[in-house]
């Protein structure tokens, strides 16, 4: 009888984490499906040929949209998935993906290619140029705020 109670207790502890992991897996699947449509070359490289009849849009407008999508995805991840409810392996997956998104966000918000994160055309003052005039600590804080990290 005590073994049965122990098993039931363990199941009650494990089942919510397994359900949270399933939510994380669903989040990843939605991300991969959406990303495959926008970046068909990378999707093909990963073995997803559903959109192989197209190339990536490398226009300034599309690159700005990519940066905005990363910020939105990072916000969604942190809103929809609570890492404390995941299994250990789920938390590791979550942290790896969140780190990837933070890195992509910082890269997009501080790109030095004449294109600001907000999509200013080449030659127009960009957020990157404005941040370059700020002291280093303020620049870092501005990039972190854009990437949902709060102050540095």
Image (cartoon, rainbow, N blue to C red):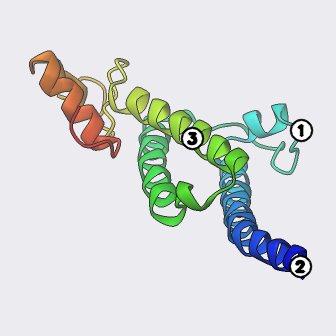
Q: Position of residue 135 (x, y in %)?
A: 9, 17
Q: Is the Cβ of the residue at disc 1 closer than 8 Å to that at disc 2?
A: no
Characterize the local packing of mark 1: few (<14), some (14-19) or many (20 or more) Cα atoms within 10 angstroms: few
What number is the disc on residue 47? 1
Nearer the observer, disc 1 or disc 2? 2
The residue sitting at 20% across, 34% down in the picture is 142
Sequence order check, earlier mark of 2 and 3: 2
Q: Position of residue 98 (x, y in %)?
A: 53, 42
Q: Which residue is mark 3?
A: 95
Between 60 and 132, the one lying in front of the other is: 132
Examine the image and state in which quarter residue 2 appears: bottom right
Examine the image and state in which quarter residue 113 appears: top left
Characterize the local packing of mark 2: few (<14), some (14-19) or many (20 or more) Cα atoms within 10 angstroms: few
- Can residue 130 be seen in this snapshot? no
* 109 over 1 or under it: above or below: above
Separation of marks 2 and 3 at Cα, in angstroms? 35 Å
Nearer the observer, disc 1 or disc 3? 3
Q: Position of residue 81 (x, y in %)?
A: 55, 61
Q: Is the Cβ of the residue at disc 2 closer than 8 Å to that at disc 3?
A: no
Sequence order check, earlier mark of 1 and 3: 1
The residue sitting at 13% across, 26% down in the picture is 138
Between 125 and 36, the one lying in front of the other is: 36
């Amino acid at each position: 009888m005590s073994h049965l109670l122990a098993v039931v207790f363990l199941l009650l502890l494990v089942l919510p984490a397994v359900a949270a992991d399933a939510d994380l897996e669903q989040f990843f699947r939605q991300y991969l499906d959406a990303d495959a449509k926008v970046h068909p070359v990378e999707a093909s490289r990963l073995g997803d040929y559903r959109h192989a009849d197209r190339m990536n849009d490398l226009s300034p407008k599309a690159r700005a949209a990519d940066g905005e999508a990363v910020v939105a995805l990072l916000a969604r991840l942190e809103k929809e998935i609570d890492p404390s409810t995941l299994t250990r392996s789920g938390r590791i997956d979550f942290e790896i993906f969140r780190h990837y998104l933070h890195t992509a966000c910082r890269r997009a918000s501080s790109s030095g290619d004449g294109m600001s994160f907000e999509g200013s055309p080449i030659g127009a003052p960009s957020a990157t140029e404005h941040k370059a005039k700020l002291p280093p600590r303020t620049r870092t804080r501005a990039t972190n705020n854009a990437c949902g990290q709060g102050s540095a």
